[in-house]
Image (cartoon, helix red, strand yellow):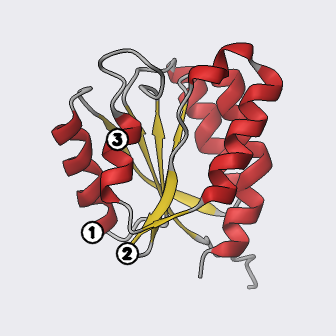
Amino acid sequence: MLTNLVHTKGKVAFVFAKELPLEFVEELLILVKSNLFAVGRIVGVEREIESVKETLFDLCMQDFSLIIIFGAIGIEVDDIVPEATASIIDKTLPGLERTIMYLLLENDEYSVVNRAVAGIYKNSILFNLPAKPRLIRLVLENILGVLRKSIK
C-alpha cells in the first residue's frame, strides 16, 4: 500500500505576550501546517523582559525553525517584546522586518507605533507580530512561503 507522505519543513513555536481568541489560534495552526510547518509549542509569557528572553532562548535551544512572538510590540511601558527579541538574535533580518512593517502599515494606521524585530539565533528565525488577528493572518499569508523556502 502506498501512502502520501508530507514532509514538514520545520517546527514552529508560538509565543503569546497577549492572549488571542482560541478560534484564531486554531486558524493559525491550520495556516502554519498548510505551509508545511509543524507546530511544536504554544507558550504564553509574562510581559516582563527577562521572562520573554528566557522563553525565546529556551525555544532556540530546542531547534525551532520559526519562533513567532505575538503582542507587546507597541509603545506601552510593558511592550517589551522587541527589546527581548533584539537581545537574543545574532543576525537581524531587515528585509523581513520591512516586509512585516509594510504589510502592517498598508492595512492599519495604528501600526506606525508598532516595532517589528526579526532575526536569527542559532538555527531559529524569530519575529514579532501585533496581537491583531486580521494583521497576523495577512502577514503570515505573505511570508510563510518565503520562510519555508529559506529554512534548511
Residue drawn at (76%, 60%) of the image: 145
Residue 24 occupies which quadrant of the picture? top right
Residue drawn at (33%, 31%) of the image: 80
- Local packing at callout 3 (Cα closer than 10 Å; few below 14, some 14-19, many 20+) is some
Quadrant of the image for the N terminus? bottom right
Q: Is residue 87 left or right of residue 145?
A: left
Q: Which numbered marker is on residue 83?
A: 3
Tag 1 and tag 2, C-beta contact below 8 Å: yes
Labels 3 and 1: the sequence-earlier one: 1
Residue lying at the far right of the rendered structure: 106
Labels 3 and 2: the sequence-earlier one: 3
SS under mark 2: loop
Labels 1 and 2: the sequence-earlier one: 1
Give the residue type at disc 3.
Glu
Which residue, given by chain and number where applicable, does mark 1 sit on?
61
Rounded to the nearest angstrom, the CA distance separating label 3 from label 1 is 19 Å
Q: In the rendered view, tell whether residue 43 sits above or below residue 58.
A: above
Q: Which numbered marker is on residue 122?
A: 2
Q: Position of residue 50 (x, y in %)?
A: 16, 41
Q: In the rendered view, tell whether residue 8 sits above or below residue 86.
A: below
Residue 64 occupies which quadrant of the picture? bottom left
Q: Which numbered marker is on residue 87?
A: none
Q: In the rendered view, tell whether residue 128 sits above or below residue 121.
A: above
Q: Is residue 58 left or right of residue 140?
A: left
